[in-house]
Amino acid sequence: MSEKNREGKRAARDRLAEERERQKSRDKQRRVLIVSAAVVGVLALAAVAGLVAANSGDDKETSGPLSAPKGASGKDQLSIPVGKASAKSTLTIWEDFRCPACKSFEDRFRTTIHELADKGRLKVEYHLATIIDGNMGGSGSLRAANAAACAQDAGKFTAYHDVLFKNQPPEPDDAFSKNDKLIDLAGQVNGLDTDSFKKCVNDGEHDSWALKSNKAFQEAGLQGTPSVLLDGKNIFADQQNPMTPAQLKAKVEAANKG
């Protein structure tokens, strides 16, 4: 074989090798495009599914059957009253059981509020919100609100309300989303850990009520939780000069003397 023929064959082999490498590269790019398209398709389906789930949640909020707890009062029965109806002063409290500021308020004012309510000088109207679920994700605010409404059915709202705030987890921790946790805490309230309470919690008996209460909170134009109004006047909005428990007591006592 001549040198010229050998060089021609080597050149042909080199061209073939180069063509094979180019083909491998094209095949690799094609596979990447196919996988990428598949991923995009999956993500698109997931987005649609998420949108459907979100819309389903909205439907539940607006069209689900409303089951208010026993003794609930006010517009749409969204208020849980504590204390004597004849009291001359009314304290309206909007709270979220996952809200750290609400816990701070409760820890500071709890004793004073209970004292005034027990003496028949103050009626308290509790409204429950679920804004932390929206801000942080999760369902602990809703689950805890439902459980508190279940406690109201059993005539144990105040005691259980206090237990929830005393055992509030850190804000990012959605521990209250677990019904078992809420039922376990009921053991700290005498007579609450019953089969009917457990069923109410596990069934989400008052979920629609809690969601409607949160919607009312949003529509009220309040700045956040806690929102605390004494006879219609917001007493917790000015954080530069917040009302103290002693000042609250003095105002209520003065109203009852008038």
Image: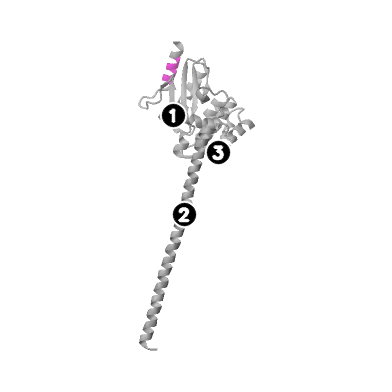
Q: Could you tell me which residue is drawn at 46 percent across and 50 percent down?
A: 43
**Magenta-colored span:** 245-253
Whether residue 252 is situated above or below residue 107 in the rendered picture: above
Q: Residues within 10 Å of mark 1 (few under 14, many from 20)?
A: few
Is 251 a magenta residue? yes
Can you give x and y, in whole percent of width and height, for residue 251 in the image?
42, 16
Alpha carbon of mark 2 to alpha carbon of mark 1: how far?
A: 40 Å
Q: Which comes before the other along the chain, label 2 or label 1?
A: 2
Can you give x and y, in whole percent of width and height, for residue 255 in the image?
44, 14
Regarding mark 1 in the picture, which secondary structure is present there?
Answer: helix
* Residue 194 seen from this side: no
Say which residue label 2 marks.
39
CB atoms at circles 2 and 3 under 8 Å apart? Answer: no
Q: Residues within 10 Å of mark 3 (few under 14, many from 20)?
A: some
The C terminus lies in quadrant? top left
* Residue 29 seen from this side: yes
Regarding mark 3 in the picture, which secondary structure is present there?
Answer: loop
The amino acid marked with disc number 1 is: Glu
The amino acid marked with disc number 3 is: Lys
Whether residue 44 is situated above or below residue 170 in the rendered picture: below
Regarding mark 2 in the picture, which secondary structure is present there?
Answer: helix
Task: Specify the color scheme.
Answer: one colour
Q: Which comes before the other along the chain, label 2 or label 3?
A: 2
The amino acid marked with disc number 2 is: Val
The N terminus lies in quadrant? bottom left
Q: Residues within 10 Å of mark 2 (few under 14, many from 20)?
A: few
Say which residue label 3 marks.
178
Q: Could you tell me which residue is drawn at 43 percent across and 64 percent down?
A: 28
Say which residue label 1 marks.
219
- Between residues 131 and 194, which one lies in front from this camera angle? 131
Can you give x and y, in whole percent of width and height, for residue 15 in the image?
38, 76
